Amino acid sequence: MSSRAAAAAWVLALLVGCAAQPKSTVVLLPDASGRDTAVTVDHAGGQLVLDKPYAAAELTRDGAQPASANAAQVMARFGDALAARPLPPASFTLYFVEGRDEFTADSKRDFDGVFAEIARRPVPDLVVIGHTDTVGTPAYNDNLSRQRAEGVRQLLVARGIAVERIVVVGRGERELVVITADNVAEPRNRRVEIQVR
C-alpha cells in the first residue's frame, strides 16, 4: 500500500475474518481538518484508489476489491482500534515581554489552557521551543530563547509535569513569524511554542 495523500489521511487497515481465508480491509477515514485526501492500495498486482471519506477496499487473494463503508459500520467494526489512537498533537504559542523571559499579560492567562490539553492525555510528552525577535546579537538571542523555554519548563514542572516528559529547545531568531530587519522589536516573534503530544 502506498500513500499519495499529503498529510493526515487516516487509513485504517486491520486483519479480519477467519484463519482459513484472512482478509484485510482498508478504509479511508475523513481528515479531521476537512482536507481532501487519498490513498492508493496496491495489492496482488492491482491498484485501487480510495479518494473519498469511507471509501474502502477488501484485500483478497485476487487483489484489492472495492467495498463500501460508512461511519456507523467503521465504528461497529473498528471502534476499539479507533479509540486506541493517540490524540493528535496540540500546539500553543505564548508571547514574552521584550528582552525578558516573562509572559505578556494575555499569555499568562493562556498558559492555563496548556494544562487542560495535558490532562486529556494519559502520558503527555511536551516540546517547548523558545524564539526571539531580532533585537540583540544572534548569540544573545540564542541564549534568551533557551532561557524562555527553560523558564516555561520550570513552570510546567512546578504544576506537576514530570521533567523527563519535557524537551526544551532554543531557536533564537532563526524562525521568525514576522520577517524583519535586524534589531526590530516584533512582539509576535518573541514567543514560546508548546507542543503537547
Image (cartoon, rainbow, N blue to C red):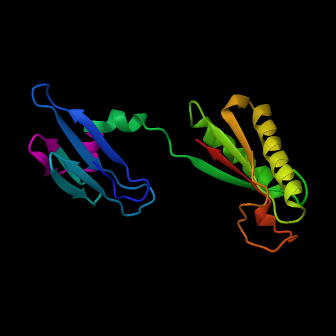
Q: Is residue 144 visible?
A: yes
Decide whether residue 162 is among the magenta residues. no
Q: Please determine whether, in this image, residue 53 is positioned above or below residue 128.
A: below
Q: Residue at x 88, y 70 (%)?
A: 183
Magenta-colored span: 59-76
Which part of the image, by quadrant, shows the C terminus? top right
Q: Position of residue 19 (x, y in %)?
A: 14, 25
- Residue at the outermost top position: 19
Side of 158 where 41 appears, left or right: left
- Residue at the outermost bottom position: 181
Seen from the viewer's position, the closer of residues 120 and 47 is 47
Q: Position of residue 140 (x, y in %)?
A: 89, 55
Side of 18 where 42 appears, left or right: right
Q: Residue at x 35, y 55 (%)?
A: 30
Q: Quadrant of residue 47?
A: bottom left
Q: Position of residue 99 (x, y in %)?
A: 91, 58
Side of 196 where 81 appears, left or right: left
Q: Residue at x 81, y 52 (%)?
A: 145
Q: Position of residue 129 (x, y in %)?
A: 72, 49
Q: Please determine whether, in this image, residue 108 is positioned above or below residue 134.
A: above
Seen from the viewer's position, the closer of residues 67 and 111 is 67
Q: Is residue 69 visible?
A: no
Q: Residue at x 34, y 58 (%)?
A: 4
Tally the numbered discs: 0
Decide whether residue 68 is among the magenta residues. yes
